[in-house]
Image (cartoon, grey):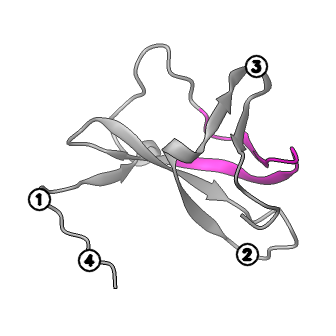
Amino acid sequence: MIAIRYDQDISLQELRHSDYQLSDGQPDITGWCICNAQTEKIGTVHDLLFDSAARKVRYLIADRSDEAGVKGVNLVLIPIGMAELHATRNEVALPGAGIYF
């Protein structure tokens, strides 16, 4: 059994529905392609989930609805630390992900 204890309040918000903006020099990766280690497209960045108290992005909200035959809305949270950004290709790489995450 895993127990998680929070010693402080965590306030996560979607970037698009807030008054917050990314820091200067940080790319807005919304809409970027998400690829696995084999460079296969496995989703698109729908939005970013950020901690307003720490003022840091914590998760990508990935939309998989167009990939792998998924029907309807299929949003998945991905910890930002798992992602590698490739700004020259407007791509987010998930090296440890398979075709179905």
Label 2: element kind = loop
List the residue tagged with mark 1: 7
User: Which amino acid type corresponds to the residue marked 1 in the rendered image?
Assistant: Asp
List the residue tagged with mark 3: 88
Classed neighbour count for the residue bearing mark 1: other residues with Cα under 10 Å, few (<14), some (14–19), many (≥20): few
Label 4 to label 1: alpha-carbon separation: 13 Å
List the residue tagged with mark 2: 72
Q: Which residues are magenta?
A: 29-47
Image location (x, y in percent) of residue 56 = 34, 37
Residue under the point 64% across and 47% down: 45
* First in sequence: mark 3 vs mark 4: 4
Nearer to me, 66 or 5:
5
Is the C-beta separation of discs 3 and 1 under 8 Å? no
* Residue 36 forms part of the magenta stretch: yes
* First in sequence: mark 3 vs mark 1: 1
Residue 7 appears in which quarter of the rendering?
bottom left
2 relative to 78, above or below = below
Q: Quadrant of the C terminus?
A: bottom right
Foreground mark, 2 or 1? 1
User: Which amino acid type corresponds to the residue marked 3 in the rendered image?
Assistant: Thr
Q: Quadrant of the N terminus?
A: bottom left
Image location (x, y in percent) of residue 39 = 86, 44
Foreground mark, 2 or 3? 3
